[in-house]
Image (cartoon, grey):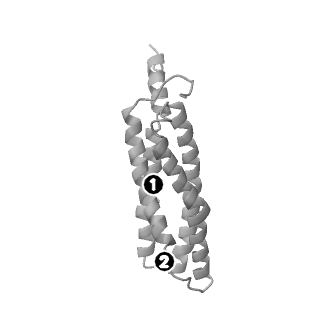
Amino acid sequence: MSLLNNDKIGNWKTVLLNPAWLCFVWFGMTAAISLLESPARFAAPALSREAALDLGRVVFSALNRAELVALVLLLILVRVSGGARRLLAEVGALTLIMIAQTAWLLPELASRSQQILAGGEPAPSRVHVIYIVLELLKLVLLLWLGFRSMSAPARTGTTPAP
């Protein structure tokens, strides 16, 4: 009896094609950085504000690249799982959040950090608050998508749904 019989391979294929696993991995990655690492960085007494800002810029840039990869994978998984129509609104909202963060918010926050690192103090702005609100909304959407994806098993066929 083979450990990798067709039933077990079919089960793994079903699991891997279901977008839920990616939603939960992405949620964990983003929550760890945004909700744990970032606040802890500014609470570290030995880390100057400038060093914390510079580190934050690097960390959030890396997180954004990883999230863009996750978004592309999620779009593919949603399509091949047969859930494209059912999950369209949530995936669309997640995509818009990622576009806003990548094209507008992160560059603006990086610019503000650069001003501080250069010895200046930027004018007050709501950009950071907007980023935080969208980050929390993204986390909620990822959980919602993950649980919705679990409620409908992925198809094991290779033909994408219309």
Q: Is mark 1 on a helix, strand or loop?
A: helix
**Which residue sits at x=53%, y=42%?**
74
Q: Is mark 2 on a helix, strand or loop?
A: loop
**Residue to which mark 1 is pinned:** 138
Q: Which of marks 1 and 2 is nearer the N terminus?
A: 2
Give x and y (percent) for residue 108. 59, 70
Give x and y (percent) for residue 20. 43, 39
Q: Nearer the viewer, residue 45 or 18?
A: 18
Q: Which mark is in front, 1 or 2?
A: 1
Q: Residue 47 carries which label?
A: 2
**Which residue sits at x=45%, y=65%?**
132
Q: Residue 128 carries which label?
A: none
User: Can you say whether 11 is above or below 97 in the image?
Assistant: above
Left-right relation of 154 to 75 = left
Asked where in the image residue 106 lies, by quadrant, the reply is bottom right
- Across the whole image, how many numbered discs are drawn on residues? 2
Type of the residue with mark 2: Leu
User: Can you say whether 40 is above or below 74 in the image?
Assistant: below
- Location of the C terminus (image quadrant): top right
Give x and y (percent) for residue 122. 56, 82
**Which residue sits at x=53%, y=69%?**
56
Give x and y (percent) for residue 23. 45, 44
User: Can you say whether 42 is above or below 25 in the image?
Assistant: below
User: Can you say whether 61 is above or below 51 in the image?
Assistant: above
Distance CA(mark 1)–CA(mark 2) = 29 Å
